[in-house]
Image (cartoon, grey):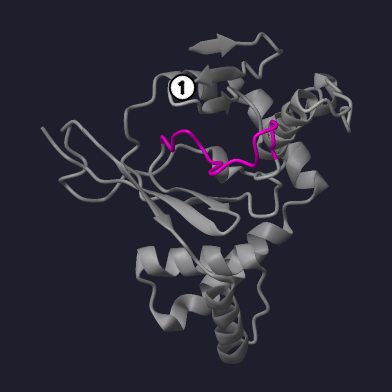
Amino acid sequence: MVFELKISSLNPKLTFFKCGGVCLGIGVADGPSGIHFINTCADVARGLPISIAPFIDPTMLHAMTPPNPTFDHTEYHSSPSMKTQEIQTSAVVHSTSVASLKISSDQINTLKARLKKDYGAKCSTYEILAIHIWHCLCEIQSESLISTIEKIHKELKRRDDEYLKSALAYLEQNHDEMTHNLYQRAHSFKSSNLKITSWSHMPIYEADFGWGRPIFVGRASLPIEGATYILPGHLVIRVCHWSYA
């Protein structure tokens, strides 16, 4: 049984299963907002007050007028296709697969210590996992690992207020084209890109509706190959597996 709640653009859905389980899903929201919404619903269900009142003011995210992005936001460009003849064919992709990889704190600390010893690089948990995933999937040789570290450091450092305002301007300037591409996209992008998002510090297991904390919290689906989410305690990475007709 599915209930849809008409709340702004969130479009939340509450699904009750025959086994007694319940699933709460959100249509459109960024990670922190989505987790906060779910946790607040859980508090209300247990009779607790709302800790942070909703503040719905879309004007806060309006871009400059007229929109004038100052950076070339490659993160919003179309993904490049694989450079093999087989992938470039018009064959239909029937399935993809998702791998759930568990990485312990000891393994992360070992990777951090190794990079610090060999390259003098001090990395955060996100950086060390991004470097390790990139290194493993792309089979980067050890001598080019330092360039990978430098690239990730550089990209994270420039994500400041100026860059984010430029991103808003870029999105507003290219809204129609990006919306069209989103709804017209293929089943698979056939791309080798990696998109790594960290939810490791979000309270995603705090949602207690009165019958205990959730067993698992995560994306209902990962529709894009290469999409990677770092969750508390384990890593979920989307690995595309092509099966042709």
User: Relative to the observer, which residue lies in front, 87 or 94?
Assistant: 94
Q: Look at 75% across and 24% down and name the residue there.
A: 45
Give percent across and percent down for residue 121: 64, 81
Extreme left residue here?
A: 245
Report the side of 101 relative to 15 (left or right). left
Q: Look at 82% across and 46% down and name the residue there.
A: 161
Q: Main secondary structure of the magenta part?
A: loop
Q: In the rendered picture of this protein, how many numbered marks are placed on residues?
A: 1
Q: Secondary structure at mark 1?
A: loop
Q: Which residue is mark 1?
A: 17
Report the side of 161 relative to 113 (left or right). right
Q: Give the magenta-colored segment's residue range.
A: 207-223
Amino acid type, label 1: Phe
Residue 210 colored in magenta in the image:
yes
Extreme bottom residue here?
A: 117
Residue 160 colored in magenta in the image:
no
User: Relative to the observer, which residue lies in front, 80 or 142?
Assistant: 142
Residue 77 vertical placement versus 203 (above, below): above
